[in-house]
Image (cartoon, grey):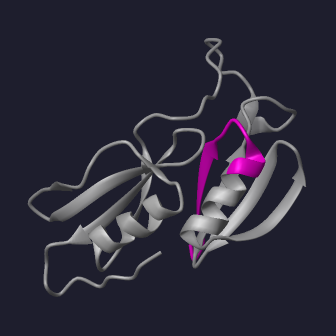
Amino acid sequence: MDTVSVRYIVDDIDAAVRFYTGLLGFDLRMQPGGGFAMLTRGSLRLLLNTPTGPGGASQPMPDGRRPEPGGWNRIQFEVGDLAAEVNRLRGQGASFRNEIVSGIGGRQILLEDPAGNLVELFESGRPDATQAAP
């Protein structure tokens, strides 16, 4: 499996596309209608869907629950200098759910897309870690 796909439910496709392409370097591959877009960055394919529409990603579950944006699941990007990346993103109006926190493996912060979905920015504390900025 060379390509990995992640699906996020978003309120506003256009705002989400601007966020991921403008701030995180994704490329827009397709946006055939108002409720769906496909973006890529390297081998990651990001599928964006609204919680309404004809597609399978917007259909209610058997118990009646509907897909919704937000939550705590997230994709992670490893960066070389977390503080510099946070400053760059804040300068472009990005919102964060927290401040930089340190743990055993390194430091992280949770960036929110326009719908409240999370992107974790992570700086490894290991000197041998491969790091690439978004």
**Residue 86 location, x and y as percent?**
36, 64
Numbered-mark total = 0
Is 98 placed above or below 5 here? above
Is 42 placed above or below 119 here? below
Magenta residue span: 1-15
**48 lies left or right of 126:** right
- Report which quarter residue 55 is drawn in: top right
Name, please, the residue furthest toward the left. 104
Q: Nearer the viewer, residue 23 or 76?
A: 23
Quadrant for the N terminus in the image: bottom right
Residue 25 forms part of the magenta stretch: no
**Residue 50 location, x and y as percent?**
74, 37
Instruction: Please report the residue visible at 20 percent of the width from the left and 62 percent of the height from the top.
Output: 107
Is 9 placed above or below 123 here? above
Instruction: Please report the residue visible at 61 percent of the width from the left and 12 percent of the height from the top.
Output: 63
Q: Does residue 45 appear in this view?
A: no
**Residue 26 location, x and y as percent?**
63, 70
Name, please, the residue furthest toward the front. 91
Instruction: Please report the residue visible at 44 percent of the width from the left and 59 percent of the height from the top.
Output: 90
